[in-house]
Image (cartoon, coloured by chain):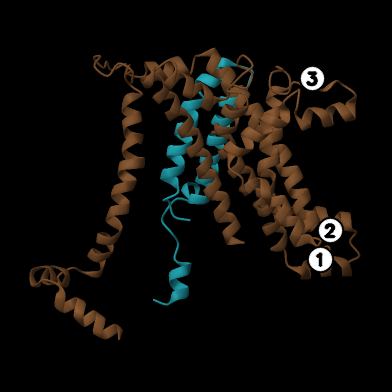
């Protein structure tokens, strides 16, 4: 099998679960958690900020191993 | 000469040891060399992290080591994430992080843009601008305390000279309104050169031919700035913002030296609250939980930082 054929071979990994997109989603969740931690408007948002950041960070660690 | 030394060393090595070394593969040898560093890393970084995670679920107090340690589950986390005072400390941190990053980015980028003009003596001025960054935070904190002194401080006299307010009325560190700004000014003074350096690297990485093409198309300087300079330097600016964000989020030394969190709790950022809980109230379990929350926040930011760094590398 030539190098071009290998490059053209389609990955069986679903398109929606590719690293780029999933990393962006994880980054957005971390950013939202960070904003929730610092915002001065609602204590309830602050309460749930940690779990949001933790979910985003864990997701980032996992999806950064996904194929491109 | 080297061969002879190697032969002598080989001959001097005891036979059982020589046999053992001969049996080690390249990979094994590599592990042998890096294992002291890994062990040190495990002892200094990894073990305390897991120990802090364990303590965060307990009521442990470091000043009462003989007391029975109870498992509290998630109670420490629930208490911190519902505590109004800690929420206020987070907002103080946010205020501090926002303004320092904004000022450092704007001033740092402007300085980088000016230095990039390559005027006569630009290397000298670059060195002068970089001086604050090279100083120790302890030294900077102490001498800014003197500069802010209402009686003898140079800063108070300059403000007095410009505004006409008597210098004794310019109480930067003891005024509730001014104290947060006093810290912001010092941090901006110290770390703007760092942002400038990163921005300068970004500006120097823009190929000259792009500007030449823009000149051919008769693009104005303003247009060139908005369409070439800023977009191409943006990943570097993002990098500087993220790095300073992470650093300022866990800022402790400067605040502790300048105000110690006061007056009252107006400059009590998260790290000062953490220190007070851990070493004044001796609530070790509680402060461990708080430290883990801050760690997750910094770790999340660090992930974004690495992602931005990879983007810059791909350019």
Q: Position of residue B250 (x, y in %)?
A: 54, 33
**Circle 2 marks a residue in which chain?**
B
The residue closer to the viewer here, A38 or B219, is: A38
The residue closer to the viewer here, B49 or B125, is: B125
Element carrying mark 3: helix
Foreground tag (1 vs 3): 3
The answer to whether residue A7 is above or below residue B82 is below
Q: Position of residue A39 (x, y in %)?
A: 62, 23
Element carrying mark 2: helix
Which disc number belongs to residue B224? 2
| Distance from Cα at disc 3 to Cα at disc 2 | 48 Å
Identify the chain drawn in cyan: A
Dots 1 and 2: beta carbons under 8 Å?
yes
Identify the chain drawn in brown: B
For the point 68% across and 33% down, the residue is B144
Q: Quadrant of the C terminus of chain B?
A: bottom right
**Circle 3 marks a residue in which chain?**
B
The residue closer to the viewer here, A4 or B218, is: B218
Element carrying mark 1: helix
For the point 14% across and 70% down, the residue is B23
* Side of B65 relative to B119 (left or right): left
Dots 3 and 2: beta carbons under 8 Å?
no
Task: Specify few, some or many for label 1: CA neighbours under 10 Å numbering under 14, 14-19, or 20 or more.
Answer: some
Q: Quadrant of the N terminus of chain B?
A: bottom left
Which disc number belongs to residue B168? 3
Q: Which residue is mark 1?
A: B211
**Same subunit under labels 3 and 2?**
yes
Q: Earlier in the sequence, mark 1 or mark 2?
A: 1
């Amino acid at each position: 099998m030539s190098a071009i054929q290998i490059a053209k071979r389609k990955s069986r990994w679903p398109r929606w679960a590719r690293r780029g997109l999933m990393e962006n989603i994880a980054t957005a969740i971390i950013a939202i958690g960070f904003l929730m931690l610092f915002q001065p408007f609602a204590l309830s948002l602050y309460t749930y900020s940690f779990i949001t950041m933790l979910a985003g960070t864990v997701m980032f660690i996992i999806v950064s191993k996904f194929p491109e | 000469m080297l061969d002879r030394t190697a032969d002598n060393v080989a001959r001097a090595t005891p036979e059982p040891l020589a046999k053992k070394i001969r049996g080690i593969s390249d990979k094994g040898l590599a592990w042998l060399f890096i294992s002291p560093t890994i062990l040190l890393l495990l002892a200094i970084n990894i073990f305390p992290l897991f120990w802090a995670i364990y303590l965060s679920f307990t009521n442990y107090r470091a000043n009462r080591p003989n007391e029975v340690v109870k498992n509290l589950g998630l109670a420490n986390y629930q208490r911190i994430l519902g505590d109004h005072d800690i929420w206020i400390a987070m907002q103080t941190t946010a205020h501090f992080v926002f303004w320092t990053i904004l000022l450092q980015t704007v001033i740092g980028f402007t300085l980088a843009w000016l230095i990039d003009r390559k005027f006569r003596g630009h290397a000298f001025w670059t060195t002068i601008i970089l001086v604050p960054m090279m100083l120790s935070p302890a030294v900077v904190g102490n001498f800014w305390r003197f500069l802010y002194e209402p009686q003898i401080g140079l800063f108070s006299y300059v403000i007095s000279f410009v505004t006409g307010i008597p210098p004794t009325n310019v109480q930067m560190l003891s005024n509730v309104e001014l104290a947060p700004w006093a810290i912001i000014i010092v941090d901006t003074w110290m770390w703007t050169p760092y942002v400038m350096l990163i921005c300068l690297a970004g500006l120097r990485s823009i190929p000259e031919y792009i500007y030449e093409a823009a000149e051919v198309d008769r693009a104005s300087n303003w247009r060139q700035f908005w369409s070439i300079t800023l977009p191409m330097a943006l990943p570097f600016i993002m990098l500087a913002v993220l790095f300073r964000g992470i650093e300022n989020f866990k800022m402790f030394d400067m605040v502790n030296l300048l105000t110690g969190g006061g007056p009252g709790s107006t400059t009590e950022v998260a790290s000062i609250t953490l220190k007070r809980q851990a070493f004044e109230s001796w609530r070790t379990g509680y402060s461990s939980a708080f430290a883990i929350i801050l760690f997750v926040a910094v770790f999340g930011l660090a992930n974004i930082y690495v992602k931005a760094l990879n983007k810059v590398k791909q350019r």
